[in-house]
Image (cartoon, rainbow, N blue to C red):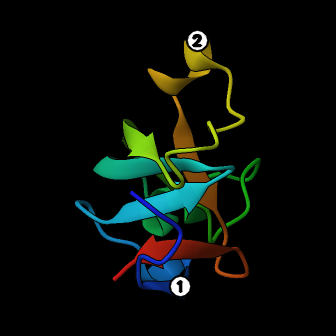
Amino acid sequence: MNAATDTRTLSTDALEVGMIVQYYGARLRLTKQTFTAEEAAKRADVEPTLRAFATEFVGNVNDDRPHSIPASWLKDWTVQGNHFAMWRVEA
């Protein structure tokens, strides 16, 4: 993979299972939504717009530069954010 891959920027609200998010040099496929805004709205201790996704590591954004996420974290990495958070998603 190289940096020339087409990407777009989406808010957390627009993320869907199956999309590949680029984060700190890693490519992460969203495998399952683990927390929804509807669930968050029911809890007083969580921001009501929070959404979260389980991920699967699928490679580096650039073959010549490794990602900067510790390898031991990748098996349980979560992409999460509110509707203000923006993500680089492969087109």
- Amino acid type of the residue that numbered disc 1 sits on in the rendered structure: Leu
Pointer 2 residue: 72
Q: x and y percent of residue 61 in the render?
A: 51, 55
Disc 1 crowd, CA 10 A, few/some/many (<14, 14-19, 20+): some
Q: Residue furthest top?
A: 72
45 with respect to 17 (left or right):
right
Residue drawn 54% across and 53% down? 62
Residue drawn 49% across and 80% down? 13
Is residue 46 visible in this depiction of the protein? yes
Residue drawn 73% across and 62% down? 47
1 with respect to 70 (left or right):
left
Quarter where residue 81 is shown:
bottom right
Judging depth in this view, the residue of 25 and 63 nearest the camera is: 63
Disc 2 crowd, CA 10 A, few/some/many (<14, 14-19, 20+): few
Judging depth in this view, the residue of 66 and 33 nearest the camera is: 66
20 with respect to 22 (left or right):
left
Q: x and y percent of residue 63 in the render?
A: 49, 46
Disc assigned to residue 64? none
Q: CA distance from mark 2 to mark 1?
A: 27 Å
Residue drawn 53% across and 85% down? 10
Pointer 1 residue: 10
Judging depth in this view, the residue of 51 and 10 nearest the camera is: 10
